[in-house]
Amino acid sequence: MSAFGLMGSQSICEGKDWAWLRLDGSTLVADRQRLVDRFNSGFGGERVFLLSSKAGGMGLNLVGANR
């Protein structure tokens, strides 16, 4: 997904008042696991995890993609 696509997705989430997390190529490696753990815990309140293909190649596993 392009940066424009992520920004558009963020706008949709904000318009629907959905809490969201974003992980892209600019996300620090040290923060990535924390974001994934927060989303997968189900306790953070986020309904959407915006993931850019620029985040790939860092060992990110999408086991929580269907929750």
Image: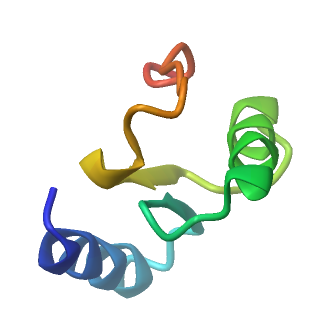
Residue 4 relative to residue 21: left or right: left
Looking at the rendered structure, the number of numbered marks drawn on it comes to 0
Question: What is the image's colouring?
Answer: rainbow
Tell me where residue 6 appears, x and y as whole percent.
26, 70
31 vs 58, nearest the viewer: 58
Q: Name the residue located 68 percent from the left edge and 48 percent from the top edge.
A: 32
Whether residue 38 sits left or right of residue 5 in the image: it is: right
- Answer left or right for 21 relative to 49: right
- Nearer to the camera, 63 or 13: 63
Instruction: Find residue 64 and report its horizontal and vertical position in percent.
Output: 56, 21
Q: Residue at x 52, y 33 (%)?
A: 58
Query: In x, y percent, where is residue 34?
Result: 81, 47
Q: Position of residue 25 (x, y in %)?
A: 42, 61
Q: Residue at x 59, y 68 (%)?
A: 19
Up-down relation of residue 7 to residue 24 (above or below): below
Left or right: residue 54 versus residue 19 is: left
Above or below, 6 against 32 in this view is below
Position of the N terminus by quadrant: bottom left
18 and 23: which is toward the camera: 23
